[in-house]
Image (cartoon, helix red, strand yellow):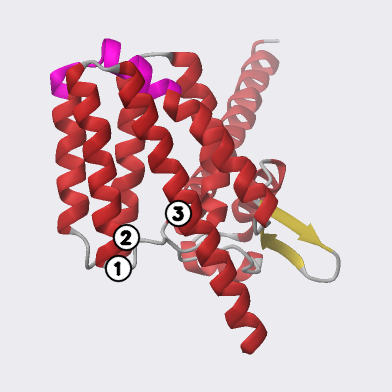
């Protein structure tokens, strides 16, 4: 009986450990693949072959397959017959709908942050905005800093439900494609509009902060739609 009990415990330990390791590998593959999409290594429209992704991430096919299934469930990836897994591309309508939701959420976040945010948090946002300006020659880095700026704005509002709603949009933002931060004019607009938001936050003016956040995202939508039209034109002429 003692041998049986010890053997059963050992079996349970092995099974639990194996499951934990599998889950850890799957999570590592998911995180690595998400980072690769975020960094532009894999872009909307790209086909994701298990063997190619595994080779790039230095992982076996099993955790990569698990990660792809999870991304498909989250609508980052779609499976097409005879083709396989492909990173989704947002349509014109989906992009507009995404920004409509961002405007609602970020306007609210800015209004609340103006009431409850601290000078230290606003200083951190200002620091990120200055870094964006300094990285005008590195579009990918500037875009990443911009994401940090907007994340910081949500954190400053101190509303866990609003923050959770914003996080649910993050995956969709990955499907927008290459950054529009490709020129001095665009960077100047972004930095200037961020400064407008910050000025209103420091004054504690909720209405002005909300309006500035909305204006910023409306401008971003115009640039994004312009990039979409340009991309379609290039494909027709290619």
Circle 2 sits on which residue?
A: 186
Circles 3, 1 touching at the beta carbon (< 8 Å): no
Q: Which residue is mark 1?
A: 183
Q: Residue furthest bottom?
A: 238
**Rendered image quadrant of residue 235:** bottom right
How far across and down, in percent of the image, does residue 86 sit? 68, 63
**Residue plotted at (66% across, 69% down):** 47
| Disc 3 crowd, CA 10 A, few/some/many (<14, 14-19, 20+) | some
Which residue is found at the position 47% from the left and 62% from the top?
57
Residue 236 location (% of width, % of height): 67, 83
Which of the two discs, 2 and 3, labels the residue nearer the N terminus? 3
Q: Magenta residues? A: 108-120
Q: Secondary structure at mark 2?
A: helix
Residue 129 on the magenta segment = no
Read off the residue under disc 3.
38
Cβ atoms under marks 1 and 2 closer than 8 Å:
yes
């Amino acid at each position: 009986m003692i041998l049986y009990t010890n053997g059963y415990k050992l079996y349970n330990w092995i099974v639990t450990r194996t499951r934990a390791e599998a889950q850890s590998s799957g999570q590592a593959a998911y995180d690595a693949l998400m980072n690769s999409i975020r960094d532009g290594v894999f872009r909307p429209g790209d086909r994701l072959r298990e063997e190619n992704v595994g080779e790039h991430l230095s992982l076996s096919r099993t955790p990569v397959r698990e990660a792809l299934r999870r991304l498909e469930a989250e609508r980052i990836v779609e499976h097409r017959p005879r083709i396989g897994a492909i990173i989704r591309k947002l349509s014109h309508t989906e992009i507009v709908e995404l920004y409509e939701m961002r405007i609602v959420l970020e306007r609210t976040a800015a209004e609340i942050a103006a009431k409850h945010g601290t000078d230290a948090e606003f200083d951190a946002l200002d620091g990120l905005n200055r870094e964006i300006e300094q990285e005008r020659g590195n579009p990918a880095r500037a875009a990443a800093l911009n994401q940090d700026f907007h994340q910081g704005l949500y954190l400053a509002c101190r509303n866990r439900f609003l923050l959770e709603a914003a996080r649910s949009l993050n995956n969709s933002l990955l499907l927008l494609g290459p950054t529009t931060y490709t020129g001095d004019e665009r960077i100047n607009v972004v930095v200037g509009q961020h400064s407008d938001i910050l000025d209103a936050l420091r004054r504690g003016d909720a209405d002005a902060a909300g309006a500035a956040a909305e204006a910023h995202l409306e401008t971003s939508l115009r640039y994004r739609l312009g990039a979409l039209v340009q991309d379609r034109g290039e494909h027709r002429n290619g």
